Image: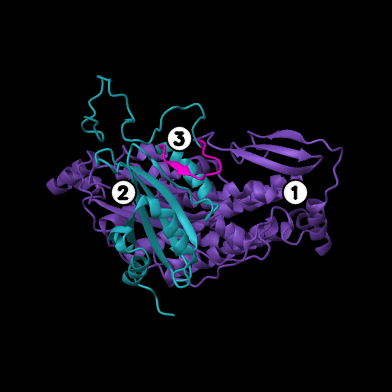
Chain colours: A cyan, B purple
Amino acid sequence: MEKLNNEAILNLIQGAFPNDVLFHEEPYGLLTIEVTAAKGHEIIEWLKNHETLSVNYLTNIAAVHYPEDAGREFAVVYQLHSWKNLFRLRIKCYLPKENVSIASLVDIFPGANWMERESYDFFGVEFIGHPDMRRILNEDSMDYFPMRKEYALEDDTREDKDDRYFGRNNQ
Amino acid sequence: MMSELKTKEAFAQSSETIDGNIATINFGPTHPSTHGIFQNVLKVDGEKIISSEQTVGYIHRAFEKLSERRPYNQITPITDRLNYCSSPINNMGWEMTVEKLIGAEIPKRVQYMRVIIMELARIADHLICNSVIGVDAGALTSFFYPFTEREKIYELYEEICGARLTTNIGRIGGFERDFTPAFHTKLQSFLKTFPKAFEEFDSMLARNRIFMDRTKGAGPISAERALAYSFSGPNLRATGVDYDVRAMHPYSSYEDFDFIIPVGVNGDTYDRFMVRQEEIRQSVRIIEQAYKNLPEGSYKADLPDFYLPEKADVYNNMEALIYHFKIVMGETEIPPGEVYHSVEGGNGELGFYLISDGGRTPYRLQFRRPCFIYYQAYPEMISGMSISDAVLTLSSMNVIAGELDA
């Protein structure tokens, strides 16, 4: 069978969802597409059930915080893998800080359960339809989401240490 | 053997209850065989597990947050503490991720050296996991036998980097020094003696009637469910799926070597054990091939921006001094970019998802930790099993607390 290239994959997705692929690029050869958050679930389900593409494996879910980017402060990044065609695919959905929620993938990939709980735990991304949306690694009574950029690793009020040379400053 | 499978199945399916009362048992937090801190709250009817719920996060150390404040070369020691049974694989996985980001070209010799060390790490990892299955089945002797061999592997690590468990082995771009003469001697002697010692270990468990009765049919999972749960590594291969990152997306010249990817059938504890045993044999084959064909050349890539110069040069050469200063003070220029790189770790696909914004530290670094992902299937796997089978299932899944909790 001929190996699918990124262009062919992208064309198939754009053909099926003409208005939902907002942006695409290929950093280091890995096809990365940004889709509308509302359609993320549907597109991933379509990719999984698609006969030729057959994206059967959810590798990873990661959340990213971009506090500077107004209206798209949070990104949920899905890394998918098709074993039949041996290609990886990265799908990104951006969410505004007012409503950090997206449909859960647990009904498509049961393995998404903990990955989504982890994103909730650290970034506060709500996954709608998740059967058990709780913290996972942090303590249950914690009332903030520690991986957000506003929480610096070190105490800003410290004066005994000049941090300019030792990492990102938070000014 | 079949009768044993039937008994376990019959046990799971029988609706017979002991006295009709469901008891709640707190299983953990300290696991009897010290695999780490795991708590499971089991609901049991007599000896049969009705349902269970895991608590994770006891040793969460915020590695992803820490990484956002550390220069790239200071993240390697963090990766040590993920799956600490095979830290060289984690270290090199991270180094390769950075090399991919900066587009570095790595000499063939470095790639082969890495393959040798990563396969040694895989052997050490699988040896511990499999011998611990023996312990949990009541065979303590099989735990001590392979420790002699594991010790030899740790001595080999020491020869390269000076450390044993948390190795921080290698550098971005290669190694801090070439294999020493002592390393060559020790590796040659290891390759000569290990296969025989390993078969001795294998003969203690692989066809042991008691061991087989205990492990066959314990904690099974079907290939379909395993895929749905995003399993990877030996646990997935035990169900019959031949997915191995080394073969599917070869890195560090794995395409040069001839090896077999063993698969199981039933996805139970025995199959997971047997897959690991066979993988150890294949790892020895890979090491032999890599060592025999070890290319001539440099043990490091030409990356003055990332690789610390020789100390003697720092004192005598202006340019080296500048590079040394830049690297140590974190003035190195890192291109912005987004990269995912994965390696076949001791227990599955270990991935690094790295976003760089051009700053001296990663903007976001996420570890795809295989055992965090597959441990969520544990309640499903032990449902209907007896408590003793649950212990065996946990050890055969090779769940490492450091990697689980990151």
For the residues carrying marks 3 and 2, which lies nearer the camera in this image?
Answer: 2
Q: Which residue is tagged 1? A: B384
Left or right side of A99 for B25: right
Q: CA distance from mark 3 to mark 2?
A: 21 Å
Earlier sequence position, callout 2 versus callout 1:
2
Residue that carries the numbered disc 2 in the rendered image: B355
Q: Which residue is mark 3?
A: B61
The outermost residue toward the bottom is A1
For marks 1 and 3, the one nearer the N-term is 3
Category of crowding for the residue at label 2, using alpha-carbon neighbours closer than 10 angstroms: few (below 14), some (14–19), many (at least 20): some
| Residue type at the position of mark 3 | Arg
From the viewer's perspective, is B209 left or right of B75?
right
The answer to which of B151 and A161 lies nearer the viewer is A161
Chain label for disc 2: B
Q: Residue at x 21, y 29 (%)?
A: A171
Residue type for callout 1:
Gly
The answer to if B312 sits in the magenta stretch is no
Residue at disc 2, secondary structure: strand
Residue kind at label 2, given as amino acid type: Ile
Between the residue at mark 2 and the residue at mark 1, the CA separation in whole angstroms equals 43 Å
- Magenta range is A124-136
Q: Quadrant of residue A82?
A: bottom left
In this picture, residue A139 sits left or right of residue B312: right
In the depicted structure, whether residue B127 falls above or below residue B55 = below
